[in-house]
Image (tube, grey):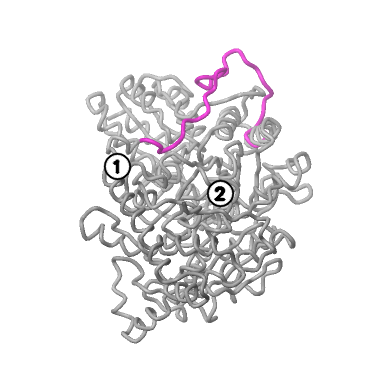
Amino acid sequence: MINRNPFVLNKEDKIYSIKGTERDTLKQWYYLMTLGRQLDNKAPNYLKQALGWSYHAPYAGHDGIQLAIGQIFERGKDHLFPYYRDMLTVISAGLTPEEIILNGLSKATDLASGGRHMSNHFAKPAWNIHNVSSATGNHTLHAVGVARAMKYYGSDAVAISSQGESSTSEGYVYEAINGASTERLPVIFVFQDNGFGISVPKEEQTANPRAADNFHGFKNLRIIYANGKDPINSMNAMLKARRIIKEEEVPVIVHANCIRMGSHSNSDRHELYRDDAELSEMDLLDPLLKFRERLTYAGIFTDEELTEIDGQAKKEISAAHKKVLKAPDPDPKTIFDFVVPKPFVSEKYPKGLQGNEKGKTMRLIEALNTTLKAEFRHNPDTFIWGQDMANKDKGGIFNVSKGLQQEFGIKRVFNAPIAEDYIMGTANGMSRYDKKIRIVVEGAEFADYFWPAMEQFVETTHDYWRSNGAFSPNVTIRLASGGYIGGGLYHSQTIEGAMATFPGIRIVYPSYADDTAGLLRTSMRSEGPTLFLEPKALYNDPASEAEVPDDFEVPFGIARVRREGTDLSIITYGNTTHMCVKAAEQLEKDHNKSVEVIDLRSLIPLDKEAVLASVKKTNRVLIVHEDKVFGGFGGELAAMITEEAFEYLDAPVRRVGSTFTPVGFNRILEKAILPNDEKIYHAAKKLLDF
């Protein structure tokens, strides 16, 4: 019986060689290599037979380094982030042919995603082998984040991030390595260099012949060069990387020189950009063939013995193939499972109403600061970081986090580089270490600057669905949003209309101090990601004042009636809530009209029932938000009302919001662009007169 992953760290000082390595170990390595290669060669046949595996990136030529990665990985302790070419890596780490084929055929029992993610995206969550993105190199940030948790909690584990050399051109890879170097984190970044980014030769990707050379200027970083075709050399390189992390407490890059024997994937035709001479040379350099020759030349195995091992691997694959063909396919009824985890449910405040409870009167900014501190005391596994978060007496550019670092320390409250993708990506990664961890990030200093983080934001939104419920980032993303401060193009936008198009994220946008405290507490206690948008113009505005009980909680998906009415419903949230209340009061004073104001508070999930109930009562609807009318969230509200309450309407659904322009800096321009009391008043009057 072949032991797939017997390597233990008490052998870490051993230097491997053909002559100096135990025969059983070499037998195990050869078995894993021939098993992997046979699966690698078999994968395209499934597509030809219309059984699946429509995406397969063959690993042949990467055999040595992939064997080594899997062998040094300690399952359940280390965290491994393989990329789509890492079939032998995960086999070496312990995955069986059955598990590999289940993934290839996208079966419901596939451990990686249950058929939800592309084939060749291997994972085993129980062992900390992570389901990674198709956005190449993206998982480097997750590896850095989980390594941060390893360091904080005192683990001697390592995070291993594996990728091709061309993906190192991605900006977020630089962010990951910069951050790991700065924080001295236990990460091994493995670059598997086969010379091509699909069809693009590496000399068109970077000026250095070796991608790792681009990172020589980073302090607290070590670089090791390995022959990725040779399992012996690769094992020694990976062992050395692990020793360096243990002894020097710095991250390591292992640059493995490989070859790509096949096409990039089964949809690529490499003969269109590689000549016959080059392809013939690849066959001669075949790492499996070379390793077999070394084993027989050294007299360790006969050719017959190795052929017998080939046969054992073939039998195991055949048995796995027959079993997988009987495995169930995904059930289409399950597509709505695992979109977003169930949130924390308040027992004391099931609808977020205070009732007879009293509290301290606060403004919105104080509610944020007080709740953050309370939740940090409540859960010692809570962390916060961002730009300008904690420097002496400064606590964020708006002082929302003022005093947090002084009370909870620099290991829980700290500054991040000016790299929004790094802020988001490491939050995703750190939350993978333990479900008890809760992370709050200031995703950017202003919501307008969040766009560089969109790549990681998208990852965060579909991690739970993509992993078939195995993992969801427990991250609250705070963003100072909106205008009315004379901030211009990069300090006055609100972005919820764009963000609401991504399933898997909760979005809240409070406008009073009590709801701010309650929704923040619920966000931080819930599993899964929440986008917490803060109307910064209201931070210190007396209009946002409210009594806030110490333990106040507001559930997601329940709107609040700010003003009862019978003649018109105004649906709103954020900065415009106060404007709508003022407009409603003026309409009653001027025209004796009863206007109801519904403060959504929570956009996703949405309190559809409250909206429709109000529409059925008043028969007229005005939707008001600060975001642009065109493409704004109000369009979804209008469509829902038209589809589900059309027969109750006595007038068209109308909307008030920003013009379809950026927000200008000059206050004159800002006033012309953003909604205000007057614009809301006239739009409401027009609807009432319809």
- Element under label 1? loop
Looking at the image, which is closer to me, 588 or 493?
493
Disc 2 marks a residue whose amino acid type is Arg
Rate crowding at label 2 as few (under 14), some (14 to 19) or many (20 or more) other CA atoms within 10 Å: some
Residue drawn at (24%, 53%) of the image:
51
Q: Left or right of 323: which side holds 627?
A: right
Q: Left or right of 647: which side holds 82?
A: right
Q: Which mark is residue 512?
A: none
Q: How many marks?
A: 2
Q: Quadrant of residue 308?
A: bottom left
Residue 78 pos. (x, y %): 59, 51
Magenta: main secondary structure: loop
Residue 315 pos. (x, y %): 34, 55
Q: Is residue 67 visible?
A: yes
Q: Quadrant of residue 37?
A: bottom left
How much space separates mark 1 and mark 2, taking CA atoms? 26 Å
- Element under label 2? loop
Screen quadrant of the C terminus: top left
Residue 507 pos. (x, y %): 47, 38
In this picture, is 363 found above or below 398? above
Disc 1 marks a residue whose amino acid type is Ala
Q: Which mark is residue 327?
A: 1
Q: Which residue is mark 2?
A: 75
In this picture, is 9 found above or below 207? above
Residue drawn at (49%, 64%) of the image:
66
Looking at the image, which is closer to me, 435 or 582?
435
Magenta span includes 417: no
- Image: magenta residue range: 337-366
Magenta span includes 353: yes
N-term mark: 1 or 2: 2
